[in-house]
Amino acid sequence: EIVWFNGEWMKYNEAKISVFDRGFMLGDGVYEVTPFYEGKAFGLKEHLARLQYSLNEIIVDLDAYGLKPLMFEAISKAGLSQKDAAVYVQVSRGVAPRTHYFPDNIEPTVLIYAFPASLKGFENKQWSVLVSEDLRWHRCDIKSTSLLANIKSNTQSHSLGLDENLLVRDGLFTEGSHSTIFFIKDNIIYTHPEGPQILSGITRKFVIAICAELNIEVKEEAFPLSELERVDEVFLTGTTTQVMAVKEMYSEGNNIYDKPEIGPVTRKIQQVFIQKTRSL
Ligand code: PMP
């Protein structure tokens, strides 16, 4: 309901954007979603660092860390200080006549708001997913608001009654449309290495650290679609997805992966993840 927009707090329906805002017209902006467990931020430093990275990569001169107090304020203004929630931060380049290059010295448009998030009980759910082609550009490390390829894929999985897409580029799994993928085979965990093909997931970093604590070997290697039948467990991670077991996968109408039970390695990681996020 309450949003930070153009330098002040206002009701969301009072916030008006210029038709020449480059975020609106060209998708020229970046964003970040940070979880708050019962009012306590989880991975705030990492989320701010990634926002700063995205801003630097698209050459917007703004101090991401300066937004930190506004994020807490968004939580309290929304009455979410005791609840599970997330804060959305978006920075668009600002308002300028439409050109493909961007002019110097325009003021970025900043939007911040908090929303309730259901973060409890993920360990009792499993997702069914669609394996589809990764249609995205080659700078997926930038958390851009230009999400057309993700939207196109996710709408297809949603229309089939599925929960997420696993994206494949050149025969290798990259990531989900809004999550990171982990494969478990012979007690080794595989996940795509950081780089331009994936978003550097914050939950991914926490899960890799949890695996180190649990003495589970992690290989940051892209996993091939052709190896899927030898996989024991698959799970997805993300800020609101947390650590979600994958139950089944579909590709062109065929079921290509089917694990009705949540596997033991996924369960262990989920338990430690819950301990960490619920003792903030
Ligand atoms: N990949 C993509 C494309 C995403 O949109 C997200 C969700 N932000 C993730 C991975 C997971 O990242 P995080 O754990 O930081 O939420």
Image (cartoon, rainbow, N blue to C red):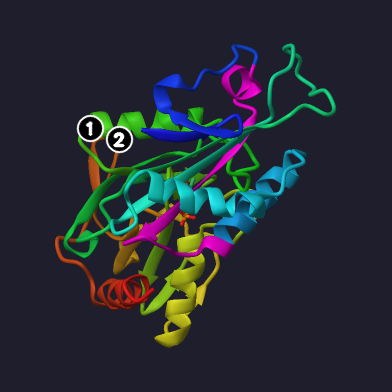
Confirm whether residue 172 shows in the render: no
Q: Amino acid at mark 1?
A: Leu
Return the x and y of residue 19 as percentages of the image width and height: 59, 11
Confirm whether residue 278 shows in the render: yes
Return the x and y of residue 2 as percentages of the image width and height: 41, 35
Left or right, 26 with respect to 106, comes to left
Task: Identify the residue at image location x=41%, y=56%.
Answer: 35
Q: Do the numbered discs 2 and 1 sit on residues whose CB atoms are within 8 Å? A: yes
Name the image quarter holding the N terminus: top left
Q: Nearer the viewer, residue 163 or 11?
A: 11
**What kind of element bears circle 2?**
helix
Disc 2 Cβ-to-ligand 1 distance below 8 Å: no
Counting every numbered tag in the picture gives 2
Disc 1 target residue: 160
Disc 2 target residue: 157
Residue 32 covered by magenta stretch: yes
Name the image quarter holding the C terminus: bottom left
Q: Nearer the viewer, residue 105 or 249?
A: 105
Residue 213 against residue 2 in the figure, above or below: below
Magenta residues span: 21-45
Task: Identify the residue at image location x=23%, y=71%.
Answer: 263
Return the x and y of residue 273 as percentages of the image width and height: 35, 72
Q: Which mark is residue 97?
A: none
Task: Identify the residue at image location x=79%, y=24%.
Answer: 102
Left or right, 95 with respect to 206, comes to right
Task: Identify the residue at image location x=48%, y=64%.
Answer: 204
Rate crowding at label 1 as few (under 14), some (14 to 19) or many (20 or more) other CA atoms within 10 Å.
few
Q: Nearer the viewer, residue 60 or 146?
A: 60
